[in-house]
Amino acid sequence: MISDDFMVPEPVRVLRKQQELETTWTLELEPGGAGRRPFLPGQFNMLYMFGVGEVPISLSGDAGQTETLIHTVRAVGPVSNKLAALKPMDAVGLRGPFGVGWPMTAGEGADLLIVAGGLGLAPLRPAIYHVLRHRERYGRVILLYGTRSPEDILYAGQLEEWNKRPDVEVHITVDHAGGDWLGKIGVVPSLVPSLDFDPEDTVAMVCGPEVMMRFTVNALRDAGVEDESIYLSMERNMKCALGHCGHCQFGSTFVCKDGPVLSFDRLRGLLSLKEF
Amino acid sequence: MDNVDDGSVITRQGLQCLLDALAQRGYTVVGPTVRDQAIVYEELARIEALPAGWTDEQDGGLYRLKRRSDDALFGYAVGPHSWKRFLHPPKVSLWQATRNGDELRFVPARDEPPRYAFIGVRACELAAIGIQDRVLMGDEYADPHYRSRREQAFLVALNCSEAGGTCFCDSMNTGPDVKEGYDLVLTELLDGDNHLFLIRSGSEEGAEVLAELPREPATEAHQTAATAVVEKTRGQMGRSMPQTAIPALLMDNLEHPRWDEVADRCLSCSNCTMVCPTCFCTTVEDTSDLEGGTAERSRRWDSCFTSDFSYIHGGSVRNSTRSRYRQWMTHKLATWVDQFGTSGCVGCGRCITWCPVGIDITEEVHAIHDDVSSRDKE
Amino acid sequence: MKNIAQIVCEHPFFHGLDGEFCDLVCGCARNVRFNPGEYLFHEGGDADYLYLIRFGQVALEIAVPGKPSVRFQTLHDGDLVGVSWVLPPYHWAYDARAITLTRAIAMDAHCLRKKCDDDPVLGYDVMKRLLPILTSRLHATQMQILDVYGTPEQPE
């Protein structure tokens, strides 16, 4: 039963766990009770570790399957370290799903340019699954992925699979690499100018560290993509996920409730403002 | 039931009857009283606990009680408390979790809150309650803790007979006259030894309660006197907000040097957010017992002036006092309008009075406004 | 088969260059190829040529003592390799090595500099083509320095 009290978590069990990168794991959780809403690509859950605390983690699985809820977690703090140390059958607290996701409907009929940086691929993966499930609804699908080094490529196997598809274009670049890396080296926004695409008919979805998103938005705008067609997934301090605690405010938006996915025309002028 | 909606007058004794009637109905009656040299809101049984004959002197960073020359029960402006302390308490337990082996359970902490009756809710405070209603129960995520307190609350409003030195509700269009959202509304009428309260109901339950009180029908003279009280108060406002499009003024001047000047004085102490009747931000605290079998999560007031407030992994978004003050003021006066349809400021003046260095939100807006207007003229 | 003038003037770097200028700069150009692993130039060497990649992939590297070279950028079809040829005293600042079979146009830097000096209108045109490349590389470097994907130092 889902309580009308959205602050109360529901206990769920870890079904499987898989290491992705040195400090990054993917957790498959029980989907929770019957009253739980299906999630939309780009939404997040609040995961609670007993006695330690709660963190927002985006859903990184396929919204079209309901057997598990998939989250990819990087161990960076007290809660995420505990999450990363969970074993199958361990219990966590779950609240969600929360927030506004990627423009899967607004993007129909358009070309999609998906730009991910580092762990930012995790919140975008449900969007990619959705597109592949409903491939006929979208035009060209281009995925640009940038990360620190070849060892930091998230979902590497899947990226390779997607790249093999004739209907998806995947470009991967890393910030730096050793001599055994034969792929591209450079930052992900640098991939945009050399792309042959129709900016006026493109919806861009961008997720990654804020600086990477800012540089990417600049490259997309330079290429002629409209502000209204550029969507970012913002990170702010989300505590309640309901728009009540006030922590995640960014100008007029509550990132937890009005976002995390926001179109750039709502962020323009504020994103580059220091300490805003 | 006779017609009570045209207004009645009650005496001091009638006011006691009101407290009794509300207690009789099961309400926990809360109203103003003097404690630690300030007028605060506490549980009341007798009208003798009201601050009879007291008033206050208020200015930037200054609050002082003074004796009045009369025995008015409500002859002062608002003190450091607001009703938010009761409707959206400083600390609320949210739930308890128990862990037994690998079993995890969550039990909502849903205490039965008191049914509150508030005595002497000013126009600015009614406006503030209306604002918090929109914030905390305006959408699908209504906060059950707030709602359970709010929906049962009985509001006895009060038309102000005295404006404080930091009051500016008139320029925020929230007061000093009470317009809506109350069960009963009082206006204190003092004419020599003749001490009366004009009383009117604003809800069905208010009318029921009023019908139980010993009262006389209000005369035209009472009505005229009540109007005069409010108009006199309107003329006493110690502060005023510039009559301009404040959201645009602030959002167009996010890099104005005035933010640096105010940051030089601001101590980031969060007093303004604690005393503000609309500030709603909270954080959560997790505690667990030593054996690790139970854990509890509670919610407490938080402030955008703390460094943890904007923390994202790697650091705080707003490290400087300048950015925190700017966040507070632009939220209160500008982005709040986008979020909830009204300003987040009701003009109660508490943030000015209780600021240890006397920072004045109206002065800050005036400064940016005057500077921008003078540059526009050049 | 295309002649060198067509190849040069169709390359993105010189695309849209005035016809007369095109003939001028073509006088400095020749076709080259590099096998995988072959260096285009080494750090500290004289910047006698600039390279316009026709197809292939070239990595820019910096040697780090005791470690394998760090690759910080790759360049691809249509890109320009090398900017030190415009900056006295014309020495390369890093290594450039072909990763895949790379075909490129090598422009004689002495020749191109002289033609730019002789005709400032051509010189200005070339500079306008060069500056955006320099700027975008500067921005990319800024982002790399920030190490935006790195592990945060403080906990959540």
Image (cartoon, rainbow, N blue to C red):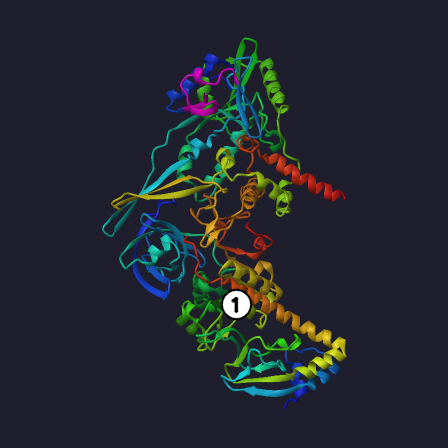
For disc 1, the neighbor class at 10 Å (few under 14, some 14 to 19, many from 20) is many
Q: Relative to C71, is B221 on the left or the right?
A: right
Q: Position of residue A132 (x, y in %)?
A: 44, 68
Q: Relative to C46, is A28 on the left or the right?
A: left
Q: Amino acid at mark 1?
A: Val
In this picture, which residue range is highlighted in magenta? B29-54
Residue B2, can we see it?
A: yes
Instruction: Name the residue: 42% across, 67% down.
Output: A154
In the rendered image, residue A149 lying in the magenta stretch gets the answer no
The one of B75 and A29 positioned closer to us in this rendering: B75
Q: Position of residue B41 (x, y in %)?
A: 45, 25
Residue B119, can we see it?
A: no
Q: Which residue is mark 1?
A: A188
In the rendered image, residue B33 lying in the magenta stretch gets the answer yes
Q: Position of residue A194 (x, y in %)?
A: 58, 73
User: Which chain is mark 1 on?
Assistant: A
Label 1 secondary element: helix
